[in-house]
Amino acid sequence: MRKIFYATCFVVALTSAAQAQQTAPQVYTPEQEVYINVERKPQFAGGDSALFAYIKEHLEYPKDLRTDARALVEFVVRADGSITDAKILRSACKSCDEATFKLLNNMPKWVAAQQNGEAVSVKQTLPIYFKVGQ
């Protein structure tokens, strides 16, 4: 009978601890908020033409690329202009995805987005084109 009592107490204690962890309030800071629509979108330093030139110069084409391909990548431009949280929305191929991540990880800081006169973090989507023979 004691074993059943102790086992029941143990299960109740575990259940209570699990519920406490699930309901613990999360601390919110404005720096963590990521916008989708903003008053002024983030911009690569120098504008779109500079972004395309950067991609053309720094994108490493996979050696196994046999056909033209396009990857679609989403990332967050943080309030300080840094790039974080990159993920592939549409994969071209595994080696193309790796080249895309490398490109983004080495990218210089952007000019941050603005909302109500403040620099904010925002999601950005960018297609990356891979052309055979380049």
Image (cartoon, grey):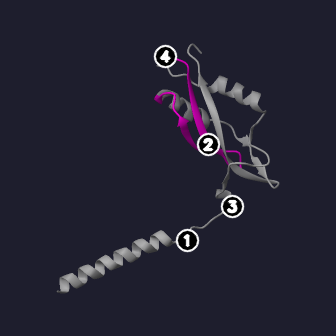
Which callout, 1 or 4, points at the residue further toward the start of the chain? 1
Residue that numbered label 1 is attached to:
25
- Label 2 and label 1: CA atoms lie apart by 27 Å
- List x then y, in percent, for residue 75: 61, 42
Which callout, 4 or 3, points at the residue further toward the start of the chain? 3
Residue that numbered label 2 is attached to:
75
Residue that numbered label 3 is attached to:
30
Q: Is residue 133 above or below residue 124?
A: above
Few, some or many residues within 10 Å of mark 3 (<14, 14–19, 20+): few
Which callout, 2 or 3, points at the residue further toward the start of the chain? 3
Quarter residue 13 falls in? bottom left
- Label 1 and label 4: CA atoms lie apart by 51 Å
Q: Which mark is residue 74?
A: none
Which callout, 2 or 1, points at the residue further toward the start of the chain? 1
Which secondary structure, mark 3? helix
108 left or right of 21 in image: right
Residue that numbered label 4 is attached to:
66
Q: Which one is in front, 92 or 47?
A: 92
Quarter of the image for the C terminus: give it.
top right
Q: Which one is in front, 89 or 31?
A: 89
- Label 1 and label 3: CA atoms lie apart by 16 Å
